[in-house]
Amino acid sequence: MFQRHSRNRRAGALLVAVLAAGAASVGPTAAADSTTIPFSDGFESGSTTAWPRKGIDGTGTVDVVAAPGAHAGKAARFTMPDQGNSYRTEIATSRLPYGSYRYAFSNYLPQDWISYGAQTIVSQWHGGEGTSPAVLLAVRADRWMMIVHWKVGPEPLNEITYDLGPVRLGHWNQWSFDITWSTATTPGSITARLDGAQVGSHQGTNSYSQDTAAPHRDTVPYHKIGLYRPNWKAEKGHVSGGTPPVVVYYDDISITPVSPASGRTTAAPSPAAPAPTASPTPVTAAPSTRPSASGPAHESPATQTSAPATATGPAGPGSTSGPADDIPAEPDTDTDNDAHPLAETGPSGRTPLVLAAGSALLVAGLLLIHRIRARSATRSTRRRARR
């Protein structure tokens, strides 16, 4: 009798351990998978530790300094030298569940910023490895550009560009992007505001949630800030141009949930949707009187225009469908983060494996329960037979 009781106690202890391990493998993941909302960072801590990931290609730097331009407190400074091997200096949040969010931030381009005829991406919302950024904010020559990418099923990648207006140097730009991320059942929308005034609006699909071939489509894109110049990659023929380093400052970043925008379209664009009937406005860079560090000659800001409209989806005043540059932003592999790798931060990476392991442990626990009960029933039957 004592031996049976001891065996039952040991089996019970083993069961508790198995169930606890299964719960532990699943439980903590939810807290680590996503950026805490609301998210806020003004860099007054003197570091960028609130940002779980960093991507630097080449010898760029990210540091926290006294904010320039009569702006109080501290700010993050992103510096990228023109040495022939530096093209990305960024930090990024983790992911969020699908929904509607306001992404607010301030950025500052110094007075000695040198006009560049191709894209300098300063903020992007990225869906993960193998995808182009769903939404990005870029400087091209002397204009702010918002570019939106999306993909539905097997259709080709769609792209649309919005001209958000002229760049002001030596000025703290107060940005807010109200984004309702699109899904198969939720129409998407983007409203961009600069210094309190609306400067751009996109209605329709704005993510990869309906692209069955895209990785990481189960959460909305994560937010990156900093500097990224695709044309400065060495494999694209860029060599050191001897120009001063590119510098941008960021401060007062926040992410807060908001109500879905009113006046959205009632359905996301479909692959069969006709192209806009109105001719899109070409995005032509304004001439600059400042020194130019343009890329190849075919990207001259004085002559470059966007390709004709070929993508399906919404277009409006100041927008155009088609590539923004002859050499556009490329899909990001996200293998260069020296903080948490992509596969360890998003539900699309590690979470399925963790859930599978946890489920296996829970199943093992249930099988153990069944086995204990079966043995107890067999013993009871034998005892009754001996009486």
Image (tube, rainbow, N blue to C red):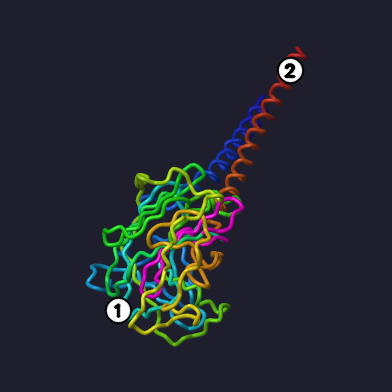
Q: Please, what is the three-letter code of the amino acid marked with disc 2?
A: Thr
Could you tell me which residue is drawn at 53 percent across and 53 percent down? 208
User: Tags 2 and 1 in contact by the CB under 8 Å rule?
Assistant: no
134 inside magenta stretch: yes
Residue 359 visible in rendering: yes
Where is residue 125? Give x, y as percent. 45, 59
Q: In the shown orientation, is residue 328 left or right of residue 45?
A: right
Q: Quadrant of the N terminus?
A: top right
Where is residue 360? Give x, y as percent. 64, 41
Which residue does the numbered mark 1 point to in the structure image? 111
Local crowd at mark 2 within 10 Å, few (<14), some, or many (≥20)?
A: few
Which residue does the numbered mark 2 point to in the structure image? 381
Could you tell me which residue is drawn at 41 percent across and 72 percent down? 284
Quadrant hosting residue 355: top right
324 inside magenta stretch: no
Which stretch appears magenta? 130-158
Where is residue 375? Give x, y as percent. 71, 26
Of residue 124 and residue 65, the one placed in the foreground of this image is 124
Quadrant hosting residue 67: bottom left
Vertical arrangement, residue 81 with respect to residue 37, above or below = below
Residue 41 visible in rendering: no
Of residue 357 and residue 324, the one placed in the foreground of this image is 324
Tell me the distance, in whole angstroms, between the alpha carbons under discs 2 and 1. 89 Å
Q: In the shown orientation, is residue 218 left or right of residue 66?
A: right
Question: What is the residue that sits farthest to the bottom in this orientation?
Answer: 242
Q: Earlier in the sequence, mark 2 or mark 1?
A: 1
Where is residue 198? Give x, y as percent. 30, 57
Could you tell me which residue is drawn at 36 percent across and 78 percent down? 287
Element at label 2? helix
Q: In the shown orientation, is residue 179 left or right of residue 273?
A: left
Q: Please, what is the three-letter code of the amino acid marked with disc 1?
A: Gln
